[in-house]
Amino acid sequence: MKSLADYNYGEGLVKAMKDRLPDGVNLAHVLMDILCLGKESVYRRLRGDVPFTFNEVVFLAKYFNISLDSIMGEKVSNGAMFNLQLVDSDNEYANYYEMLNYFHNVFTYLSKDPGSQLNFACNIIPYALYPSYDYLNRYRICRWLYHNDRLSVPSTLEDIEIPRKLVEMQEKMAHSIKNINTVSFIFDCNVLKSYIREIEYFSALRVISESDVRNVKKELLLLLDELERLTIVGRNDLGKQVSVYLSNLDFESSYGHAEREGFQICFFRVHLLNSFDSQQKKICDAQKAWIKALKRHSTLISQSGEVERIKFFAEHRALVGAVKYNLSE
């Protein structure tokens, strides 16, 4: 059995860093700048004569957006390694900001490759589509606060104060997704129904007000308008290709897969705001294959499937329009 000393993890780290640099950029020069090391110190690390320190490995993994399991995970076990993006209820906005920043960096890295692809399979309207909608964002935070037994949940969505820094990060993340060359969304056939049931439930509990319900409905209709324009044109406002599929199957969760040359990542949505992801090849390949299989059970409505597209948006506008503030005692 091999010991820890038998594995050359520095070699994997160096390869991963090189893969993430643009052509013609010298890795040694980059490391000299960001690690504040001399030329000889850097080259000794690159040759493997001197190992990277633990702090250097952690810093470089974050700087280059490298998952440590992609370097060592498959060598040390047959299991899978995941990165949990968890919003701590004691410091929700700061943690949420860090999570959004993490995904912003991932999507920005992806977008630098003209062959980049991002695929979502969604059982709710994906968050990537609505950072610019104020009340949908507030409602998302409100749901999370309530589910985590926070007694300080505001009486109306207007009272939820989202830090400007967080709003800006939401917009940056959405923009980084728009820059990815090809993006596809697969919606299950009940994509809005559970969301609408939850709005009516929270209104019955007086967690959200009557004006909140009106504002959320208004923004949902605007979001459906925007999504319909995307399906008709097949491209976003940056000219990148966007495909929308309607699945004939229900999904148990929302998940995705993204890739560019030399890199891939898969992710899963959990607990409203939280998620976990993996860059391990075995897991990413399985996720990619699963999403590809879902497309076989789906109908493309981007620049195609006009009858299905019209029916989908008519039904979902009717669902949103029928939502009423629950006045039951």
Image (cartoon, grey):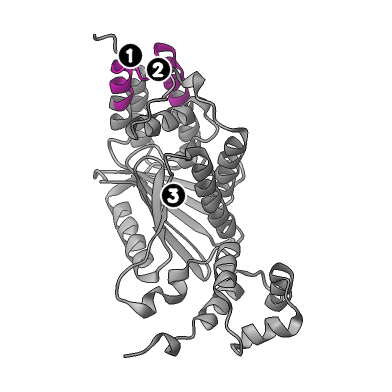
Give the number of the mark in front: 3 or 1: 1
Is disc 3 in contact with disc 1, using a CB cutoff of under 8 Å? no
- Label 1, on which residue? 324
* Magenta stretch encompasses residue 122: no
Q: Is residue 24 visible?
A: no
Which quadrant of the rendered structure holds the N terminus? bottom left
* Magenta stretch encompasses residue 200: yes
**Magenta extent:** 198-220
Choose the circle earlier in sequence order: 1 or 2: 2
The image position of residue 67, as x and y in percent, is 48, 66
Q: Which residue: 24% across, 43% down?
A: 250
Is disc 1 in contact with disc 2, using a CB cutoff of under 8 Å? yes
Choose the circle earlier in sequence order: 3 or 1: 3
**Residue type, mark 3 in image:** Ser
- Label 3, on which residue? 184
The answer for how far apart the CA atoms under marks 3 and 2 are is: 30 Å
Choose the circle earlier in sequence order: 3 or 2: 3
